[in-house]
Image (cartoon, helix red, strand yellow):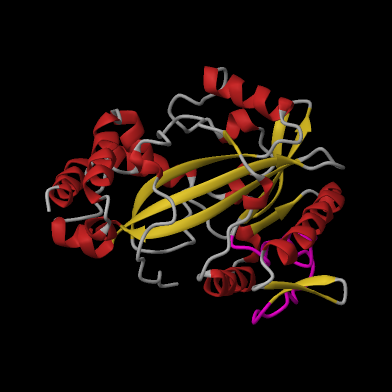
Amino acid sequence: MTAPVTIRPAHTPYDGSSKLFAIGLKPLDIANWIEVDENLGAHLAEKRRLYETIPDKVFVEEAETRAAQQEVLDLLASHLPERFPQTHRLAEGAVEVLGALPPAFPAPLDAPLVTASLLVQEDLILMRRGENGWRLAAGALCFPSSWVLTEKFGRPLHEIHDPVPGFGPGSRPDQLIARMFDGLQGQAVERFNWSIQAGDALYHPLSDVQRIDRATNRPSKFADAAEIDARAFIRVERQTLRKLPVSRDILFTIRIHLDPLAVLARHPDRRSLANSFADQLMALDCEQLDYKGLTADRDRLVERLRDMADL
């Protein structure tokens, strides 16, 4: 899928408001739970393509999660037509997206979570509490940011976060996240994450083996400033968490925004944004740069950002 031309990024967490490798959860007004923009049709079409071509890679479920999946679908059916009447409406008891094809997939893609995911640009993950903590019990994930759904399926949080520098089992962030999941009640929360990728692919998986290989070999993505302007995209993840009222599972949503890095040169706040972006890249240590796949290109990216700030 080709990303549309960006006039101004919807979110700029690299302005210093959301630090990398920090939990950074903030209360969320439920009215702003889901985001809809001009890319809705294109994003849903890309989801359909992925469900049709690689279904086993973009949807997983434990059989016992169907009731919780339906709970997610019901929440969206209640929320979307009221919040976004210009794009969503109720028709014969079900929600439809205006101008979009209804889902028509064989089992197991007739699952409520898949249906729900084809109403929104967000990916949807269900976390369930068990003896070993909160685990990934079901997921409709079409737009992964450098991870693989099938590798994380059924695994508890401390194992899911094991590759993240500073977030491994027994770490303070690991313990804080577990307590936060346990304590989450009616208040929804959100956080942001961001990275830089080459190209504008929404489907951007990376296996654990590929991550280790990347950290070992440290390949470059960009040869020079011209290639950065042509191929570097800021990948912003807006993540939300809310506890489902009936099942008590936690719904984790992930909304991807892709913006060309070059768009910052045209931003009215380019000086502060570019300098803050560069400062945060410079603050990453070797392990963090390896995790993000930016070791070989960090200095080149920082130089380009400083140039943008001085325009």
Instruction: Tell me if 32 is positioned left or right of 264 in this view.
Output: right
Place residue 100 in its image quadrant: bottom right
How many numbered circles does the render carry? 0
The answer to if 45 sits in the magenta stretch is: no
The majority secondary structure of the magenta stretch comes to loop
Residue drawn 40% across the image and 34% down it:
20
Magenta-highlighted residues: 98-121
Place residue 226 in its image quadrant: bottom left
Residue drawn 83% across the image and 56% down it:
70
Q: In which quarter of the image is the N terminus?
A: bottom left
The relative height of residue 119 versus residue 252 in the rendered view (above or below) is: below
Residue drawn 46% across the image and 57% down it:
257
The relative height of residue 2 versus residue 139 in the rendered view (above or below) is: below
Instruction: Tell me if 267 is positioned left or right of 32 in this view.
Output: left
Q: Give percent across and percent down for residue 289.
A: 31, 36
Residue drawn 63% across the image and 73% down it:
52
The relative height of residue 45 versus residue 249 in the rendered view (above or below) is: below
Q: Is residue 78 visible?
A: yes
The answer to if 109 sits in the magenta stretch is: yes
Q: Give percent across and percent down for residue 173.
A: 53, 22
Tell which of 190 and 285 is nearer to you: 190
Tell which of 57 and 86 is nearer to you: 86
Q: Give percent across and percent down for residue 31.
A: 67, 51
Place residue 303 in its image quadrant: top left
The relative height of residue 7 versus residue 222 in the rendered view (above or below) is: below
Q: Give percent across and percent down for residue 142.
A: 58, 60
Q: Can residue 171 be seen in this view?
A: no
Tell which of 309 and 184 is nearer to you: 309
